[in-house]
Image (cartoon, rainbow, N blue to C red):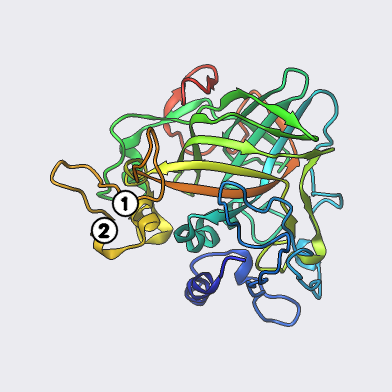
Amino acid sequence: MKSRISLVIALGLVCGIGAFSWAGCSEDEGGSPAPAKDTGGGGGVCDEPTDIENPPIACGPEGGGAPACSSTDKVGTCPNNACMYRTEQTGPTKNFRMGRIRLWAPSSLMNLAAIAVDPNVNARCANSGSESFTWLMQVDTAAKTLRTGGSRGSTDDTTFAFLEESVDASKVEGICPGFVGPKDPVDLRPVTTTYTETDGAFTTPKMALINVPIFDSSGVPIILPLREAMLKSVKMDGSCVGKYEKKYWCDGDSLGWTTGGAIIAKITAEDADRVPVKSAGCQSLCAILVNDSTKTEGKVCKRGPDGKVPEIGTTCLGGTGCKNAFQLSATFGAYGVTITTSAPADAGTDTGGGDTGGSSDAADGG
């Protein structure tokens, strides 16, 4: 499996200064941080993928050889069911919130995941979760369609609503003063697409663009601009995608989740260079992804004489043979919730775009 050495070093610094709360900083009953593990190779379900577009989907604590935690007191308030679902899903329309997003690529994003992704995706009842990164899925099993996108938090941990708005790009200065964001408003509306089903699992076609927000206390989100995004081999099992086991909550690798679907997407270097990451010292997402001081200038990616970011990525978007983007590969678990048409009560600071109308589709790309 992918080595977590650099992740452990980063967490040592993070936990030491007490700046962030995340699962790896939690202490088990014995008073020691739950360690991240390298589960090794040997053909197991958690081995590092040889093809990053096909990550190991059914990877969990048992497949990784994790021991049970000495106590489950810290996650004792989580619902006691197969994936801590809030609302049992019946009928043709199924509503889910992703409760675990496990990154496999790019490797340079692994350090950031523990700081900006995990604690914000985690449910409030588990692993110091904040639910400030809420990614929803609404699956119509009769029409074979999927609606997916971001949401703000929920006051009851059960009821969520898709964002029907845009964010004023100039407000990124609210995250990092002086940072230059995108020129145009960023559309946060959900995307609707079809899907096909094989052996009980569904896969979508590539969607042009999904802007997925991660909110913080300022109300201005970090935005993950995912292009050519697809959900792959997603298996719904009742009210769950994958499963959550309380007894493995302290496992620093799985956080107790066995994932049940994949997210494959691309992030262009140009898009990423307009995304500030406050928890990483206000570097741009591009600077984090490229992870090479010779290709950065200050806290952003170095640009060429034409004013553009050169081809410093790992994959090509919009052609063949180019290197203008970074390949993202992740697996996820999700639990059943209620999705309403109105915003949750704790909608927070206005992002400046107001209501932008109905949902976008795959052709619009957001």
Q: Secondary structure at mark 1?
A: loop
Disc 1 packing (10 Å; few <14; some 14–19; many ≥20):
many
Q: Residue 355 at x, y = what percent?
A: 48, 21
Image quadrant where one finds the N terminus: bottom right
Q: Secondary structure at mark 2?
A: helix
Residue that label 2 marks: 295
Query: Where on the picture, by quarter, is residue 308?
Result: top left
Q: Residue 347 at x, y = what percent?
A: 56, 36
Q: Of 120 and 342, which appears nearest the observer?
A: 120
Q: Amino acid at mark 1?
A: Ile
> Please, is residue 193 above or below residue 1 in the view?
above
Q: Amino acid at mark 2?
A: Lys
Q: Nearer the viewer, mark 2 or mark 1?
A: 1
Residue 221 in view, yes or no: no
Do tag 2 and tag 1 residues touch (Cβ < 8 Å)?
A: yes
Residue that label 1 marks: 312
